[in-house]
Amino acid sequence: MTIPLALSCALGLSQVSAETWSSLNNAQSSNAAQTPANVSPQTKPSTSSTASASNNSANQILFSEIEMLKQEIQRLQGVVEKQGYELRKLKAEQKERYLDLDRRLSQVAKSGSLASSSSSSGSEGREQYDHAFALMKERKFDEAISEFKSFLEAHPKSSLAVNGYYWLGQVYYNKGMLDEARKAFAFVVNQFPDHQKTLDSKYKLAVVLHRLGDKAQSKPILEAIVSDHKGTSTARFAQQYLKQHF
């Protein structure tokens, strides 16, 4: 009976020991499982919040850059539109200058003014004048300017001198040398008020003044041409210019 009792005690102790170890292991496993569960709810919100804030900041920067690009595109579009307008305006003015020059050359050819002379002294310098005029017709403006100036210096009393000043102003105008053109046309208007070239010189002077930014002087001259010279081609040109620019 002693042996079975010892065995029974040994078995009991073994069972208790096993249960104890099992309980300890279960407790450790439970603690191990509970630890991440307790910690993770505290760490996850922090990580998620940081990522969300970072994304919001990046989105704001991107949005700002897009808005800046839009504004820059709008500014550049405005610049392009303005430059396009200025280019069209310059082309129109250039075309107007050439058409006006061709019109006046045609008038001179029809009137036969180049072939007429009132006296031998009046035609003084005819050859040089004709050469300058031919250079202008060929659009050799630099050479024409030099030849007209030489003619005017050599023959200031010639009956062709007024025409020389007028055409010199026209060549300056076609080259865009507006201040020099102004001087030439003003010389004809002021020094030869009754000459056949004076009316055209007045019109060209008004146009040049306008292009130089002097509307205060330009407009009255154009209005005077329209009112005082009705029915002339110069008055029609003046009326058209007033409508387009004033």
Image (tube, grey):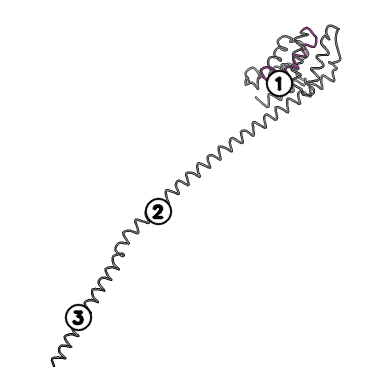
Q: Which residue is mark 1?
A: 173
Give me the residue at 26% from left, 70% from top: 28
Residue 216: image location, x then y, percent:
62, 18
- The residues tagged by marks 2 and 1 sit, at their Cα atoms, a distance apart of 69 Å
First in residue order: circle 2 vs circle 3: 3
Quarter occupied by residue 209: top right
The N terminus - image quarter? bottom left
- The residues tagged by marks 3 and 1 sit, at their Cα atoms, a distance apart of 122 Å
Q: Which residue is mark 2?
A: 52
Q: Which residues are magenta?
A: 156-180
| Magenta span includes 160 | yes
Q: Secondary structure at mark 3?
A: helix
Give me the residue at 40% from left, 51% from top: 54
| Magenta span includes 112 | no
**Amino acid carrying mark 3 in the image:** Val
Q: Residue furthest left?
A: 2
Q: Nearer the viewer, residue 147 or 223?
A: 147
Quarter occupied by residue 244: top right
Q: Is residue 195 left or right of residue 22?
A: right
Q: Which residue is mark 3?
A: 16
- The residues tagged by marks 2 and 3 sit, at their Cα atoms, a distance apart of 54 Å
Quarter occupied by residue 164: top right
Q: Nearer the viewer, residue 245 or 130?
A: 130
The C terminus - image quarter? top right
Q: Secondary structure at mark 1?
A: helix
The residue mark sitting in front, 3 or 1, is 3
Q: Residue furthest front?
A: 3
The residue mark sitting in front, 2 or 3, is 3
Residue 193: image location, x then y, percent:
74, 10
Residue 137: image location, x then y, percent:
79, 22
